[in-house]
Amino acid sequence: METLLGMKSKVPKKPVLYILLTIGFFVILIVFDKLFGFHYEPVEYETSHDAEHIEEVPAYNADSTEQQSFTSHAEPIDSVAEESEIVTNPEHTIITPENLSTSDYFENLINNYKTNVLSKLEKNKSRTDIVIRYYHHQPDGNSAYVLDELGYYIHEREVDSVYRDFQSNAIFYGDSVSLNDLQIVSYTLINQGLPIKIIKPSRFHDSWKAHSIEIGADTTSTDKTSITLEQLRRISL
């Protein structure tokens, strides 16, 4: 009996056992945390900080580089563009001194045109920036077709039978036609014997005929004096 009572007294009570188990559980958690724990917060902070730094620095450098490049190269780019336009635009490339005689003026005009425009066209190709709308009349013969040799595209238009016997005597032009083209076409026709009486803007000069030069007959101008080469030289748009 005494032995049984002694054994019971040696067995710890349940509350004490629970406390010991709880303490042991937390000790185990602390040990595992020290050995295998993951510190997310510092890693996330470092990563986000680096990402922000990487995004900001290139953006700033790119902007400053573009601004510096634009500032330092803006003028050269503009000057190159202007030079390119001078090379390709007959209105700027064909320069004729005022002290030339009228015949030399037009000879120089044609020669410059052949050098700066005609020579740059592909073989058997016509210009696409201007159209010659030609109303062919019987008395004209093949006069106007000489323009084809200068690279002009001739779009022949039908003529009313009432006007077929009138010789072409009028030239109409659109707003996009250069003075040089107008003078070259007019000079060529006059040299071919056509009595050009009037040269003026076409009816639709600022719309669908802006890039056209029209050649036809104006029956109201048959009695007018033909335009001379000297007058053609002084013409302005």
Image: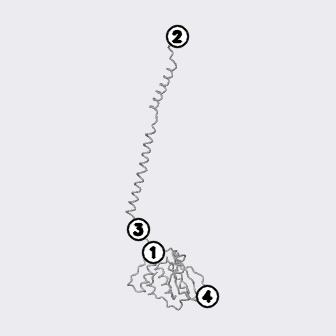
Mark 1 or 2: in front is 2
| Dot 2 amino acid type | Leu
Q: Earlier in the sequence, mark 3 or mark 2?
A: 2
The residue that disc 2 covers is: 5
Residue occupying the far right of the picture: 161
The quadrant in which the N terminus is found is: top right
Question: What is the crowding at mark 4: few (fewer than 14 residues within 10 Å), some, or many (at least 20)?
Answer: few
Q: Give 28 or 132, whichever is nearer the viewer.
A: 28
Picture residue at 39% right of the left edge, 65% below the top = 74
Count of numbered badges drawn on the protein: 4
The residue that disc 4 covers is: 162
Mark 1 or 4: in front is 4
The residue that disc 3 covers is: 78
Task: Give the alpha-carbon distance from disc 1 to disc 3, as whole Å.
Answer: 16 Å
Q: Is residue 1 above or below residue 155?
A: above
Dot 2 falls on a residue whose secondary structure is helix
